[in-house]
Image (spheres, rainbow, N blue to C red):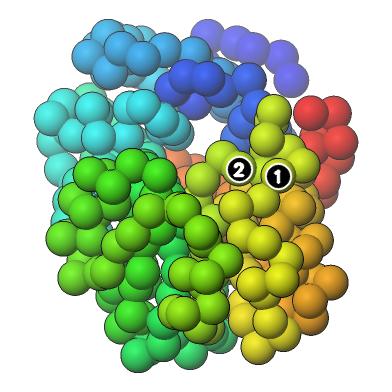
Amino acid sequence: MIITPQTKFCGLIGYPIDHSLSPAIHNAAAQFYKINAVFLAFPTTDAKSAIAAMKALGILEYSITMPLKEKVIPYLDEIEPQAKELGNANTIINRDGKLYGYNTDIDGVRLSLKGLRIKNKPVILLGAGGVAKTVAYVIHKAGGQLHILNRDLILARKLAKLYQAKYNDLQDIGHKVRDINPYLIINATPVGMGELKNQSLVPRTALYSKMVVFDLIYNPRETKLLKDAKMRGCRVISGRTMFLGQGARQFELWSRKPAPWKIIEHAFDINILKK
């Protein structure tokens, strides 16, 4: 693509962001529609300066990752109801200098869990950090019986209080899984990626074929948890659907065009091999 004075800019902000495939899928979608826009990555932890740059340079959209999802909230002019209720945003749209906040992670989680009957069923959520809060919000809205297991009990208690959930630590997790007997297990921790790539919090022997196992990690596409779950006959859901779902809505918000699903899926599949 040739960048001209008329080219619009979008960006990913947060840190670290080297692993993210957001630029790849947004640029592929923009090229498909021949939109004169480019999506770049801006590594930063400074929400105030990033927002000032957005206004000064007329940046059209920000996709936001940790640790900025909550920090950007005070700088927004308007926030969609679900993002406001959750207390964080992963998307900012700049419309003539007025900043609108959205949370499309919610859409990604809901798309991943589409078709599952969660109401009144026990759900284990591993983790209590940023993305875990979004998952807890979705499970609570769906009427699931949420059990939060996290290394830091203070964080687990804080999140559990928000969504009327039970909580515990990660010690002897195999016995806890058997006692809870969950319909759904969701991993919202980094265990399974990066230096923890070949690890899983849940012992394989604690998994049973009637369970559904959802891992939010999308790189690698199949974590050890999902491999173990497959071996035990569980239904598995990878983080790919969530990532593409949240990215698709982001694209629709800033471009005002339908997300070209085949294009963004192809961009994801090609680029993940390079990571």
Type of amino acid at the residue the image marks with label 1 = Gln
In the rendered image, the quadrant that contains the C terminus is top right
Mark 1: give few (<14), some (14-19) or many (20+) Cα within 10 Å: some
The circle drawn on residue 199 is: 1
Type of amino acid at the residue the image marks with label 2 = Val
Q: Nearer the viewer, residue 254 or 52?
A: 52
Describe residue 165's horizontal placement relative to residue 136 as left or right: left
Q: Nearer the viewer, residue 22 or 254?
A: 22
Q: Is residue 266 above or below residue 206?
A: above
Which residue in the protein does label 2 denote? 191
Describe residue 158's horizontal placement relative to residue 40 as left or right: left
In the rendered image, the quadrant that contains the N terminus is top right
Tell me the residue at 19%/34% (across/down).
73
Question: Whole-percent x and y of residue 257?
Answer: 53, 53
Tell me the residue at 62%/77% (across/down).
212
Question: Whole-percent x and y of residue 19?
Answer: 65, 27
User: Which of the two discs, 2 and 1, labels the residue nearer the N terminus?
Assistant: 2
Q: Secondary structure at mark 1?
A: loop
Say if mark 2 contacts mark 1, CB within 8 Å. Answer: yes
The circle drawn on residue 76 is: none
Q: Secondary structure at mark 2?
A: loop
Tell me the residue at 44%/41% (across/down).
254
Q: Is residue 265 visible?
A: no
Q: Is residue 149 above or below residue 111?
A: above
How many labels, in total?
2
